[in-house]
Image: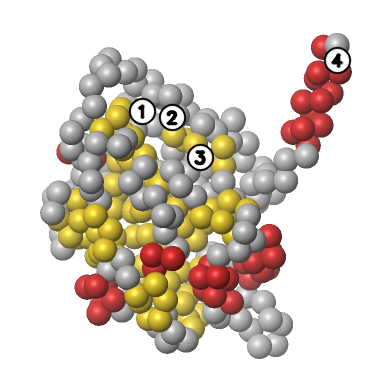
Amino acid sequence: MKYIFTISILFLISCNTNQPREINGNKLDSNKNKVQNNTSMTSNDTLSEFPASIISFGKPLGSNQNNILGQSPIDINSTTTKKFHSTDPLIHYQNIVLSSIQHTEENLKINLSAVDQNNNYITIKGVVYKLIQFHFHDSSETTINGKRSLMEVHFVNMAADSSFTVLALLIEKGSSNPLLEKLINASPLSQKTGIKQNGINAINDSINLNKLLPTNTVDYYTFSGSLTTPNLDTVPNKGPVTFIVFKSTQQISNDVYKKYIHIYEKPNYRVIQKLGSRIVYENVQ
Ligand SMILES: [Zn+2]
């Protein structure tokens, strides 16, 4: 009986089609990289505001390495989060013009014009962070309870003092999202080969960013971290960066995902970093 059970489990594992892509031929086992959260809950109290200790404002990116509480990405252990309730961040995203669709060395990045940056922003405790760009990771960088998602989008928002807040959106395989498809189709391509070509496209179409966000943006995890590039390994990157990871996910169809990895051939997710003494907070309603 035990033998049959073990065989069944092995079969189920081998049937998992959502395995993360490999970096340099080495599969990053999310369980192996899973970091234990040593922070124990000493109280069931729910904070009534956005946690002050992880707000990046007043701590410009890279200005003082002592400001950095730790590196990103992390594995979020949903059983050890500290709960709070806040209506922040208020997200004021709307239409942007696709004037800079960039094939970077590693991924797809959409840069916003100065006008669009002024009209697309978030606020935390009244402080404005303008959206300057958003970009893609394949597979996801953030893992939740050891599970890695198919992809992740980072919306990079910057305040007047050069402090950063990143909104992170996880993407799973599922139904097609027309906006995702449009962005991937607009990637700079070589006319000769039809595949990757570093560069920038301007198609000047207008898109509504809210169609990329999940409907529910109030349920999320948040913590203090860092940029995740350029050092994909363990060499420290600049921080601090307030990270907000939505619980709700977006979906991409298998066909569109295949198109993405045809153009952006190498996976670009950083290894899971140690949480250390940091607290992961969870916004609850
Ligand atoms: Zn990123």
Mark number for residue 81? Answer: 1
SS assignment at label 1: loop
Q: Amino acid at mark 3?
A: Thr
Answer with mark 3 or mark 1, whichever residue precedes in sequence.
1
Q: CA distance from mark 4 to mark 1?
A: 37 Å
Residue at 29% over, 49% down: 241
Q: Is residue 65 left or right of residue 22?
A: left
SS assignment at label 2: loop
Residue tagged 3: 143
Q: Amino acid at mark 4?
A: Tyr
Answer with mark 4 or mark 2, whichever residue precedes in sequence.
4
Residue tagged 4: 3
Residue 275 position, x and y percent, is: 39, 31
> Which mark lies nearer to you, 3 or 2?
2
In the image, residue 261 sits, relative to residue 242, either above or below, namely: below
Give the class, few, some or many, for how many residues have Cα within 10 Å of label 1's Cα (few <14, many ≥20): many
Residue at 43% over, 24% down: 79
Residue tagged 2: 78
Q: Amino acid at mark 2?
A: Ser
